[in-house]
Amino acid sequence: MKKAPAFIAIIITAFLLIYAAEEFPEWADPNQPASLHVSPRYIEKTVEETAVPNMVTSVLADYRGYDTMFETSVIFTAGIVVMMLLRRPKKW
Amino acid sequence: MVREFEDVIIQTLCRFLVPFIQLYSLYVFAHGHSSPGGGFQGGCVMAAAFVLIFIAYDLNEAKRRFGEKALLIFCCLGVFIYAGTGWACLLLGSNFLDYGFLSKVLPTDPVKARYYGMAMIELGVQIAVMAVMVSIFLDLVTRGEHEEILEEKGA
Amino acid sequence: MIWQLDLILVFLAVIAAVAAITVRDLLSAVMILGAFSFFMCMIWTQMGGLDVAFTEACVGAGITTAFFIATLYNTTRRTKD
Amino acid sequence: MLEYLVSKYNYWMYVVIILIGFYGMMAKNNLMKKLIGMGIFQWAIIFYFMSISAKKGATLQIVSGHGAAYDVARAIDYVNPLPSVLMLTAIVVAVATTGITLSVLILIYRRYGTFEEDEIIKLMNEKGK
């Protein structure tokens, strides 16, 4: 009974997503827009500016340090929330 | 996991395996700058070592090695190391998390200071991820009732 | 990146995903989910995202499966669909 | 024809995996199965982001050379590091949300004793809460 609406929603979503996928650039094209805008600066300047050869680490910890800091605090919050949900008197 | 199996093969193997897993975790953390790896991966591998202790031994042994209070302290310590590095940069006259100014206190040039600043915050991420993963696993595996289960066992 | 290898791995991942949804035992579904996440890890290795693949192998196939099994240990593994 | 298929099949495959997860979230009756579907959905989205980071003929995101003599890095030679960084964050947040969801499932099982959605709704109507 629940399967018919699910199939209808899936067919509509599949049509929309495949229709949108026609507009994407070719897979693994070196000149796709995502590879041209911000990342060349990270790739070319990472050794010169940070002395770290692994550019994932340098972008993660230095150029986008704010992102990683609040992500660490999200993990911390998750640990505290699990503790608050489960460690409590049984009567609740 | 909560109650002990008393299986000699599993316990001996896990006791031999745990130090090597922890050493590998420290290797992953320390070489995160020049090879794949870093704080998250090292923390998850370190957490897997403690999960192995949980599976091989019982709850009592695991809590004796890594109690709940120590877990909470390590959780807070990881986030504190990360944010404290940012505040150190701020106090030295730079922007938040701009590690170049750490060269005023470290005996290096600004470029190498960024290298060591990154190592510092990866240490914070490793400690926080390890403690949080072990804490979530401990709460999930006992339904949050560590004390009741320990009393039931008479330990 | 080799597209033939990628195609084989993606097909295996699709099969694992379908099996994880349809199997009628929660413990088996969780183990197949771990296999699915490991196929994803191999796909990213051959695409060049080695850090993400490493994280996926630690987190997706290791810690998440341990969390699921810890939950099933305390609840039930039976399911109707 | 083969070139067109090779250039586009990766995006179609991500659509297929995303729809499997979507179907699991919508049509399954068991709450744990819904959570598994959500996990598949998350990994499909990460798969899409990793697909846009791939480049033909490029190598890993680690600059070659050693010591003080690193090679000059050209952007065409290395895979795009930005989606890798964003998805590294996304994976770890995903495991945190999975932990919270599992603890909520344990609470649901403690109160109702089942994971089936229709039985839970029936019990909720009977108890009136």
Image (cartoon, helix red, strand yellow):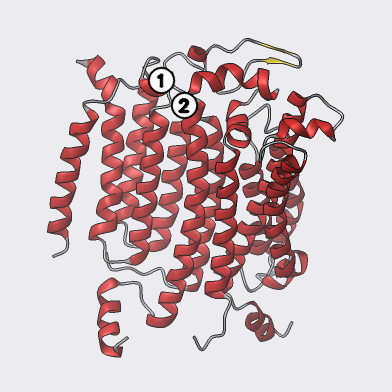
Quadrant for the C terminus of chain D, please: bottom left
Under tag 2, what secondary structure? Answer: helix
The chain letter under disc 2 is: C
First reached walking from the N terminus: tag 2 or tag 1: 1
The chain letter under disc 1 is: C
Residue nearest the observer in this picture, B97 or A69 = B97
Residue B58 place in picture, x, y as percent = 68, 70
Residue B27 place in picture, x, y as percent = 73, 37
Q: Is D23 above or below relative to A22? A: below
For the residue marked with disc 1, what is the amino acid? Answer: Ile
Residue at x 55% of width, y 41% of height: C55
Discs 2 and 1 carry the same chain letter: yes
Residue B120 place in picture, x, y as percent = 74, 41
Q: Quadrant of residue A83?
A: bottom right
As drawn, the label of residue C2 is 1
Give the class, few, some or many, for how many residues have Cα within 10 Å of label 2's Cα (few <14, many ≥20): some
Residue at x 64% of width, y 77% of height: B146
Q: Quadrant of residue B99?
A: top right
Residue at x 40% of width, y 34% of height: D49
Quadrant for the N terminus of chain D, please: top left
